[in-house]
Amino acid sequence: RDLHSSPTRRSSDLAAQEHQQGRLYLAAARIWDDTTTTSYFHVIPSIAEDAEVDASQALEVPGAAKLFAYEGLGWFAVGDGESPTITRYTLDERGKLKKGISISLLDYGVMDLWDSLYFVSADKAYYPDTTGSQLIVWNPTTMEVTGSIALPETVRDGYLSYYGITPLRRGKDLLFSVGWFDWLENDTILPETGLVVLDTERDEVKRFDLDDRCAGITQA
């Protein structure tokens, strides 16, 4: 890795200028060794090959933090690397990250965060809790948790139910796959894939299908 700052104009100065013109990018990186992982989030003015990164201006978060975003809303957040907490961020007038409201999923039994969020609209999203076999319903605008949806049909004894990384929208329905993995004992995959069809207005499972032609599909 080669993280350095310009000797003449720092990336933070360029970011402030680009922020006024409406063009900025947010990049995430992780650095780890045998014992620790640290995440860094950089506001940069360009994604060109020669773009420079001022490491001193990065947001540093312990652990394997996640970067979440919702296209079209101007919404982005950081999932904590050491707790089940999602924190919304905005940009200040200088184009620097400004911490906002946080929500914790600890009350719903979540101990750490997976990589996906399922966005429906500006005021509804789901966190797919693979370990707890549930979807946690929350509002990205107000940053409030509003409930949960149990998914008992996705449970397989001895296997982790891995919910799809990239769900699909079809009208008011949300579709996502389920693969079953045993990474702890036998390093095996259950020879089938499930499909959940969720009514996002009623927050109810409309249909659950199984297909044994392919196993462990977790992307659309």
Image (cartoon, grey):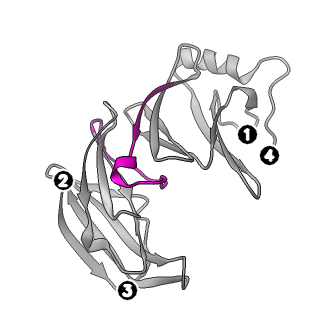
Separation (CA) of disc 3 from disc 1: 42 Å
The amino acid type of the residue labelled 1 equals: Glu
Considering only order in the chain, which callout, 1 or 3, is on the residue closer to the N terminus? Answer: 1
Please tell me which residue is depicted at 25% across the width and 73% down the height of the picture. Answer: 153
The answer to which quarter of the image holds residue 46 is top right
The residue located at (54%, 85%) in the rendering is 186
What element does badge 1 sit on? loop
The residue that disc 4 covers is 1
Taking the spot 85% from the left edge, 21% from the top edge, the residue there is 7
In 3D space, how far apart are the residues under numbered discs 2 and 4 (Cα atoms)? 44 Å
Q: Which of marks 3 and 4 is nearer the N terminus?
A: 4
Instruction: Check disc 2 and give the amino acid type.
Output: Asp
Indicate the position of residue 67 as horizontal and vertical percent values: 52, 43
> Dot 4 surroundings within 10 Å: few (below 14), some, or many (20 or more)?
few
The disc, 2 or 4, on the residue closer to the chain's N-terminal end is 4
Residue under label 2: 203
* Residue type at numbered disc 4: Arg
Residue 91 position, x and y percent, is 52, 22
Q: Judge depth for marks 3 and 2 and give the one in front.
A: 2
Question: Which one is in front, 103 or 176?
Answer: 103
From this view, report whether residue 12 is shown above or below residue 53.
above
> Which numbered disc, 1 or 4, marks the residue that appears first in the sequence?
4
Quadrant assignment, res 145 = top left
Left or right relative to 96: residue 104: left
- Whether pointer 1 and pointer 4 mark residues with C-beta atoms closer than 8 Å, the reply is no
Q: Give the range drawn in magenta.
A: 99-123
Residue at figure coordinates x 54%, y 14% from the top left: 20
Give amino acid for label 3.
Arg
Disc 1 target residue: 49
Quadrant of the frame with the C terminus:
bottom left
Question: Could you say which quadrant of the image residue 27 lies in?
Answer: top right
